[in-house]
Amino acid sequence: MSQQQALVEVRDLKKHFPMTRGILIQRKVGAVRAVDGVSFDIRRGETLGLVGESGCGKTTTGNTILQLLRPTEGKVLFDGVDLSELSGEELRLLRQRMQMIFQDPYACLNPRWTVARIIGEPMRVHRMAGRKERMRRVKELLELVQINRAHINRYPHEFSGGQRQRIGVARALASEPEFIVCDEPVSALDVSIQAQVVNLLERLQDKFGLTYLFIAHDLGMVRHICDRVAVMYCGVIVELADRDPLYEEPLHPYSQGLLSAVPIPDPAKTRARQRIVLPGDPPNPADPPSGCRFHTRCRIAQERCREEAPSLREAAPGHWVACHLV
C-alpha cells in the first residue's frame, strides 16, 4: 500500500506501563507490555476493525494513536506528521482532525454540563466559532444524530443509553474531524440500539468521508461495518486482512479459534463447522511467553514457535499473518 493512501500510519508502536514496588522509595520491577510492537496503516475513508480478547491491548492502541497515552516507543504518523514528536499547541491544533467515541455512554459525558455545552466544547477549545454560531452548529449536529434539537438544554441523565452515545457521536463530529477512533461504541447498548448506532456511523462516514478505527468484541458487527480487520493477541497483531478473506479463510490459529465462535444463523452450517476451543488462559502481558505469544495455547505449535517470535508477513496479497507455520 502506498503511503499516499494512508491517513494513519502506525510503526512499531509500543506502550509499556511500569510496575513499581516500595512505599517511600519506589523502584521499577517490571512493565506491563500492553502494546508491544504494533504496525498497520489506515487508509483514507476506510474502516479498520481491531478485534481480540479483553486485555489484549485494543483500547490502549487507540488511546496511544490519539496520544491520549504517549507511546513508549514507535511512531504514529497522521497525514504524514509524526504525532509522537508533537506536544502542546502543535498537538492541540492537529487533534481537531482526530476524535474518539468512547465505550461507556454513561461515564464519558459530564453530568453537570448541558448537551449544548458538551457538544459545543470542542468548537470552543479549537476556536472554531463564536457562541451564537456554536449553538446553531450544536442544533444541526443533534438533528444529524437524530436527537430533537429542543433537548439542547437537557442534562445527560435525562437521556437513554443509546441517546447518550448519539450525543457522544455528535461531540466527536463537532470539530469536523477526518479520523475517529470508535472504542467499542455499541458494547454497552441494547442489541436493538446497537444496529441503529452502527447504521448512523456508516451514514456519517458516507456523508463526511470519515476514516474509522473500529475497536470491538462483536465479530458479527465488525464484519458488517469494517473494510479490513486486524486481529490482536497479547499486545501484538497476529493477522491483518480484508474482511471477507479473513472471515472465510483465517490463517492464524488464534484467528481460526476466534472466528469459530461467531454464531451462524443457519443450524445446518453450525453443525457442520468445526468448533475450535482454545485451551488455557491468555498470557500475562507483564510476563509474556518467549517466541510466539500464542504458542502456549496453539494446537499446532512446534519448537521453533517457543523460541522465535514470528514477524508479520504477507502470506497472500493483502493478507498479513504472524505465524511460522502458515
Image (tube, rainbow, N blue to C red):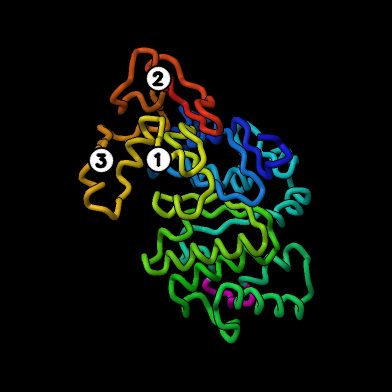
Image location (x, y in percent) of residue 209:
67, 58
Region of the chain picked out in magenta, as a range: 111-117
Regarding residue 41, the answer to whether it shows in the image is: yes
Judging by the rendered image, the residue that carries numbered circle 3 is 273
Quadrant of residue 146 within the rendered picture: bottom right
- Number of the label disc, if any, that sits on residue 325: 2
The image shows residue 296, relative to residue 121, as above or below, that is: above
Quadrant of residue 134 within the rendered picture: bottom right
Q: SS of the residue at dot 3?
A: loop
| Left or right side of 161 for 313 | right
Residue at 67% x, 68% y is 121
The image shows residue 180, relative to residue 128, as above or below, that is: above
Residue type (three-letter) at the residue carrying disc 1: Glu
Marks 3 and 1, how far apart at CA: 12 Å
Residue at 78% x, 65% y is 127
Other residues around mark 2 within 10 Å, as few (<14) / some (14–19) / many (≥20): few
Judging by the rendered image, the residue that carries numbered circle 1 is 248
| Left or right side of 299 for 319 | right
Residue type (three-letter) at the residue carrying disc 2: Leu
The image shows residue 74, relative to residue 265, as above or below, that is: above
**Mark 3 or mark 1: which comes first in sequence?**
1
State which quarter of the image contains the N terminus: top right
**Mark 1 or mark 2: which comes first in sequence?**
1
Judge by depth and name the residue closer to the eye, 231 or 296: 231
